[in-house]
Amino acid sequence: MGETAGTEVLVIGAGPSGLFAAIELARRGVRARVVEREPGPHMQARATTVQPGTLEILATAGVLDRMLAGSEHLRFARIFDADLRLVGEMAFAGVGCTWEFQCSLPQCDTEQLLADRLAELGGTVERGVEAVSLKQRDDSVLVGLERADGTTETVEASWVIGAGGAHSVTRESMAETLVGSTYPGTSLVASGTVTCGLPRDGNALIASPEGYVLLIPLPGERWLTFIGDLDEDETERLARDDDAGLVAAALGRRVGQGIRMDEVAWASPFRMHRRLVPQLADGRLFLLGDAGHLSSPFGGEGLNSGLHDGFNLGWKLALELRGRARPGLLDSFASERLAADRHVLEVSDRLHKLAYRAVEATRTGIAPAPPTPDQVAAMLQSRSMLDISYAGSPIVGEYPGGTQAAAATPAPGDRYPDRAALTGTGHHLLLFGMTEDTGIERLRRRWEGLVEVSQATGDAGRAGLAGPGLVLVRPDGHIGFRAPAGPAGVAALDAHLDSYLIPA
């Protein structure tokens, strides 16, 4: 068994979250080693929905154009009864994002476009390589790797990113468990061709007394189909029936007519979970995606939250490796993303319960009270992943604290609404109605290479300012600091940056 030294970052798992973390590191000059135990890419649909808030971060990473070109654009979420009569409709228009729709693309295709982007940045994926053991030392992690041919290797990595899915060797080495619950019942997911008259500009939840059917359009006139909850007879048939026969029978039981599954490319039974680890980091180990959290697919947010995990970690770990980060910066990954992932689970749980209430309404004939416009707007923000906030994080602040300006939105920690228009990989200091004779030039020199200073031409209100002032936007597009115009605000920003970064 040989030992390889000098690997700065080892990423375990080439799913969406692992690939995206590697992309974010590569954009900043850090070449991570990515290993994946599967010998080749899978061809399964799995998670398909990419939310508007995730499209924003894909834009900054140079992946968006390919995502838009290859996917179906879903502008509505609709509910139908068993006779395919429209019961309710939610439109993404007006959600407050450049891309006011969800993208629907099989997970295997999403992984391929991410792998292509990583290759453009000089990275590769080593397939057929499984991480079988991890041992932390003071300044590194020893990782035992095993190849499909039985050969082994020990890698010494400065940092390890565990993105190996629900059965994570990284999580096991941290002695962490996915805490939470499993929803009752077994459901069935299948992808293939479907004959139906449903519009393809949105997903369709069909509620019937026998259970639900969720149809999501996929490229190439295909559909992803969720069917649940399976009864005892249907569950028993899973072991003996072919996929096409089982899916057709389960579909027919819930929808009397108007929908027919013509061809099944892939099908699998599954259980839905609501689980989260207590800690996403331990020393030199980090957890991303399903390794750290599992949510109901009704929210369509599991894959997305994994990408946001990688987006948050990438810039912080790169600064650590460049020697420009104080200890608090990397520590903030776990606290920020744990709170955000907890919020994602809450949103997915609410959508899960809404779907089951629709099924229950068909059984009882009692329709639930319709949501208010404010409730609809809040739910759209949440399911679009546009309300993720790191407020309260130790690397987020404002000057002066506790003023009326603190109530203005977006607030420090919130997503900056125009983040997709910002380019580069560093912090952005946006000056609204300010001249540079208030200490800005000194600040610019001190934080050269980390902070790009520019005059903002837009509405200061979109940045949460009541008048002239400054707004610091972090590399992940969240507001890190804000202050009114004046030397005191500039000095406060300088102190804030010095709390987690090392100046030039």
Image (tube, rainbow, N blue to C red):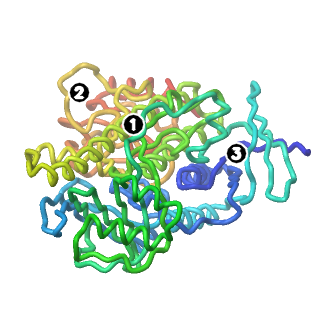
Amino acid bearing label 1:
Ala
What is the number of the mark on residue 151?
Answer: none
CB contact under 8 Å: marks 3 and 1: no
Q: Secondary structure at mark 2?
A: helix
**Is residue 249 placed above or below 220 in the rendered structure?**
above
In the picture of the structure, the residue carrying the numbered disc 1 is 340
| Towards the viewer: 420 or 273 | 273
Tag 3 secondary structure: strand
Task: For label 3, count other residues whose C-alpha is less than 10 Å away and answer few (under 14), some (14-19) or many (20+).
Answer: many
Res 288 → quadrant: top right
| Residue hosting label 2 | 406
Q: Is residue 411 above or below residue 222?
A: above
Neighbourhood count class around disc 2 (C-alpha, 10 Å): few under 14, some 14–19, many 20 upward: some
Q: Give the mark toward the camera: 3 or 2.
A: 3
3 vs 39, nearest the viewer: 39
Q: Is residue 411 visible?
A: yes
Q: Which mark is residue 10?
A: 3
Picture quarter with the N terminus:
top right
The span from disc 3 to disc 2 (Cα, nearest Å) is 40 Å
Type of amino acid at the residue the image marks with label 2: Ala
Q: Is residue 439 above or below residue 189?
A: above
Mark before the other along the chain sequence, 3 or 1:
3
Q: Residues within 10 Å of mark 1 (few under 14, many from 20)?
A: many
Along the line of sight, which residue is nearer the eye, 470 or 123? 123
